[in-house]
Amino acid sequence: MDLPMTDPCEDALQVLYHFLDGELTDDRRASIKAHLDTCTTCLGAFDFEVELRQVIVCRVQDRVPDSLRLRIAAQLMESEED
């Protein structure tokens, strides 16, 4: 994950997910950030991944059926009475 590669673009794209997840060392993170600051192609890939993550967070949410909520609430109330 933190081993340098020969091509800076390949290197940046290879560890992009680790970069976004904060899983790189400070030095490695600084190196990738410096590359992203100067390479519009890799910056575009970075921006896409950031936006994709935001869309996923906003749209992928589990919805609990009302019937399940009511059953859980009833069980909680029942256990509090005991």
Image: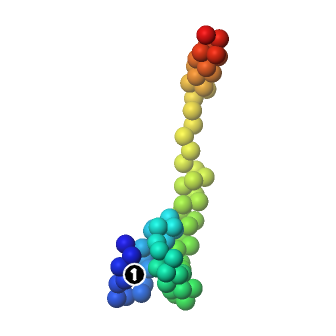
The vertical placement of 16 against 65, above or below, is below
Residue type (three-letter) at the residue carrying disc 1: Asp
Identify which residue is drawn at 57% across, 29% down. Answer: 65
The vertical placement of 28 against 69, above or below, is below
Q: Between 56 and 14, which is closer to the camera in this rendering? A: 14
Q: Which residue is mark 1?
A: 11
Residue 29 percent coordinates (x, y):
50, 77
Identify which residue is drawn at 54% across, 86% down. Answer: 34
Instruction: Say if residue 6 shows up in the picture.
Output: yes
Asked whether, in this view, residue 66 is left or right of residue 26, the answer is right
Q: Quarter of the image for the N terminus: give it.
A: bottom left
Residue 15 percent coordinates (x, y):
42, 73
In the picture as drawn, the residue positioned furthest to the top comes out as 82
How many marks the image carries: the answer is 1
Dot 1 falls on a residue whose secondary structure is helix
Identify which residue is drawn at 65% across, 11% down. Answer: 81
Residue 75 sits in quarter: top right
Badge 1 density bin: few <14, some 14–19, many ≥20, Cα 10 Å: some
Residue 23 percent coordinates (x, y):
47, 67
Residue 8 sits in quarter: bottom left
Q: Quarter of the image for the C terminus: give it.
A: top right
Instruction: Say if residue 45 shows up in the picture.
Output: no
Asked whether, in this view, residue 32 is left or right of residue 4, the answer is right
The vertical placement of 80 against 9, above or below, is above
Q: Between 20 and 2, which is closer to the camera in this rendering? A: 2
How was this image coloured? Answer: rainbow
